[in-house]
Image (cartoon, helix red, strand yellow):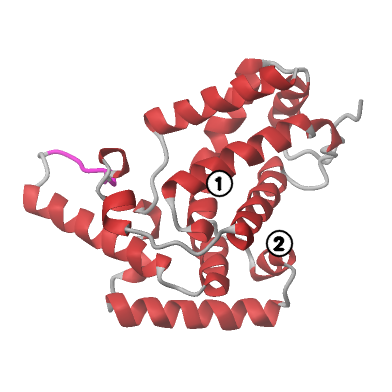
Amino acid sequence: MAQPTDRMHSSGEADLVCRAIAKDEAAIRTIIARHNQRLFRLARGIVRDDGEAEDVLQDAYVSAFTSLATFRGDSTLATWLTRIVVNAALQRLRRRTERPLDLAADVYDKPGNVVAFPFTSPPPDPERIVAHKQIAKLLEQAIDGLPDDFRTVLVARVFEDLSIEETADLLGIRPETVKTRLFRARRLLKEALAEHADSMFADVFPFAGARCERLADSVVARLKDIG
C-alpha cells in the first residue's frame, strides 16, 4: 500500500489520510466535513443543480476514498479532491441530456436551500434578511445563466480562490484563456447585478448542517458496501 510522502500538507492531514486508507470512519467523516462546502460549491457551479451536485460530490468522494492509497502528497488533499470533483462534474455536464429546468421550483424554493447570513446582536431586521436572500438568489440565477466555460472558470477562481495557473491546469486550458473567460464572466454578472456581484460569493450555494451529514452518511455506507 502506498503511503503519503513527507510533502503532505501537514502531519494532521497525513494522519487523516492514513486513517482513511485504513477505512477509519471518523477520519473519512472528518475529511468530508472539512471539504464539503467548497467542493459542493465547485460541483454546483458547474452542473447548475443542487441534486446533481450532491450526486457528483458523493460519486467523487467514493472514487477518492477507494483510491486514496494512490495519493502521494505531491499536492494538498484539498487540491487532489478538487481535481476529482471538477472532473466528475464536467463529465456529468457532458453526459447531461437536454431538459428544461424549473429553477424556481426545483432549486431555489426548497426549504433546505435557505441561504444563512451571519448576524450579530441585536436581532437582524426582517426586511434585511429578505433582501439578502433575494440578492443571493439573483446571484445564483445569474451564475447559472453563464456559459459553461465561463461559469467553470468563475467558480474555480472566485469561489475557491484558485490561482490562474491552478485553474488553467485544472481545466486543461491556457492561463490566457482563464483570464479571458473570467473577464467575460464578471462582465456578464455585473451587467445582470450591477455592483452587487463580487461581494456575495461567500453566501451562495450553501452546503452544511444536515445536508453535509446526509452526504457523509451516504458516502460511508457506499464505502462499506464496496468493502
Task: Using the numbered discs, state the Cα–Cα distance from disc 2 to disc 1 in whole angstroms.
Answer: 14 Å
Q: Are marks 2 and 1 in contact (CB under 8 Å)?
A: no
Which amino acid type is shown beneath numbered disc 2?
Leu
Query: Does residue 117 appear left or right of residue 227 in this picture?
Result: left
- Name the one closer to the observer, 72 or 144: 144
Q: Where is the C terminus found, in terms of image quarters?
A: top right
Which amino acid type is shown beneath numbered disc 1?
Leu
Other residues around mark 1 within 10 Å, as few (<14) / some (14–19) / many (≥20)? many
Where in the figure is residue 196, as x and y percent of width and height? 28, 70
- Residue ID for mark 2: 170
Quick check: 58 above or below 89?
A: above
Where in the figure is residue 201, as x and y percent of width and height? 39, 59
Quick check: 79 above or below 175?
A: above
Where in the figure is residue 6, as x and y percent of width and height? 86, 36
Q: Secondary structure under badge 2? A: helix
Span of residues in magenta: 115-121
- Name the one closer to the observer, 221 or 33: 221
Seen from this angle, which residue lies furthest right?
Answer: 1
* Residue displayed at 70% across by 41% down: 77
Q: Quadrant of residue 152?
A: bottom right
Where in the figure is residue 82, as x and y percent of width and height? 65, 49
Query: Does residue 216 appear left or right of residue 116 in this picture?
Result: right
Q: Where is the N terminus found, in terms of image quarters?
A: top right
Quick check: 73 above or below 155?
A: above
Residue 117 counted in the magenta span: yes
- Residue ID for mark 1: 39
